[in-house]
Image (tube, rainbow, N blue to C red):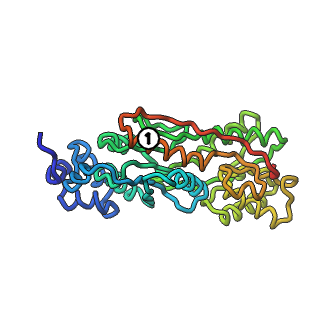
Amino acid sequence: MAKATIYDVAREAGVSIASVSRVLNNPDQVKPATRARVLAAIDKLKFIPRQDAVARARRGTGRIGIVTPSLTDDSFVERLRGMFEALTGMTYEAVIYLVTSSAQRDGILTQLALMQPVDGIIVIGVAMNDEIIERFIANDVPVVLFTDARSTLTCPIHQICVDHGAGAQMAADYLLERGHRRLAYMGDMIPPDYSESLGRLKLDVFRQRLAEQGVSLPDAYVALAPQNMEEARQQAHRLLDLPVPPTAIFASSDTQAIGVISAARERGLSIPEDLAVLGFDDITIAEFINLTTIRQELKESGRTAVRMVTAAIESKDRQPEIVQMPLTLVVRNTV
């Protein structure tokens, strides 16, 4: 059977050859509906760009692609550090692909699946679906994906799984055990559609756990802010300005918890006597400021991702593996 050409893809999708080329090389310039039709045609026809035939015959680029929506978020940085530590002394080098839009995500992942400029891929914090994953499977590209325990993906794929909801339950239980009944939540704003949404999950589970114990979490006690200390500091001031302010705040990240602590200190509040603060992640600085937090093994998860992807590269018939990373309550001095 003859291999599909770019002309076949264009005909199947009902677009010009130039449109197919733009989907592969400049996806931001293509309307979402057109991009979707072209990608569907590529998948249906099992199209492989002609220039990629030589690259595939070469086998082994010596590179691992890391796809991420952030290079500044502290938890992402910690995971990346773990990856680079694991790559030290290995024959692979890392290539980072930064995703800043849904079109760019589709373009990057399509290029990685079809043109294979890397031997394997690690995806952190980027929203994925079965259609995208099937494209990697069809083209025999090893992928390790960071997921949440409540992921709805059904395709078999290597995963590093963290149960963020269980962490939120852990936070609620500990704050209630410490006698707090006026609690607030500091979380992420609704993320863009190309980014994995975890802040809302933590909020929903935290609120549900409190309700199970007869404690409400009114909307006024929920603050959503971009993932940085300054925005969290400003939102914390709003919470502390409430007629009856909270006695404890659970922040969905240590970065935001630090912003809360900053706001409390500006008001002369003592922590944890006047305000308890509980974070999530256990980034490096958390230990230095004695922050009580829910630890996820960030560096270790990065190291594990490298071990998994390199094993999959070296043995592509390896069965998909799901590694569940533990969460631990680390008690310090802020609760």
* Residue displayed at 86% across by 65% down: 268
Q: Quadrant of the N terminus?
A: top left
| Residue 252: x %, y % from top left | 65, 50
Determine the residue positioned at 17% across, 58% down: 16
| Along the viewing direction, whichever of 328 and 45 lies nearer the viewer | 328
- Relative to 266, 15 lies left or right: left
Q: Is residue 209 left or right of residue 333?
A: left
Q: In the image, what residue type sits under mark 1?
A: Ala
**The quadrant where residue 217 appears:** top right
Q: Is residue 320 above or below residue 91?
A: above
On screen, residue 308 above or below 91? above
Residue 123 in the image, given as x and y percentages of width and height: 46, 49
Q: Which residue is mark 1?
A: 311
Give me the residue at 86% from left, 55% from top.
Answer: 274
- Viewer-side residue, 134 vs 179: 134
Residue 190 screen position, x and y as percent: 55, 54
Question: Which residue is most to the left?
Answer: 2
At horizontal 81% and vertical 43% (from top left) the residue drawn is 181
Q: Is residue 28 depicted above or below 250 in this figure? A: below
> For the residue labelled by badge 1, is the local secondary structure a helix, a strand or a loop?
helix
Q: Out of 88 and 229, give the one closest to the viewer.
A: 88
Q: Where residue 155 sits: x, y (%)? A: 40, 35
Number of numbered tags placed on the structure image? 1
- Visible residue check, residue 214: yes
Dot 1, how many residues are within 10 Å of its Cα: few (below 14), some (14-19), or many (20+)? some
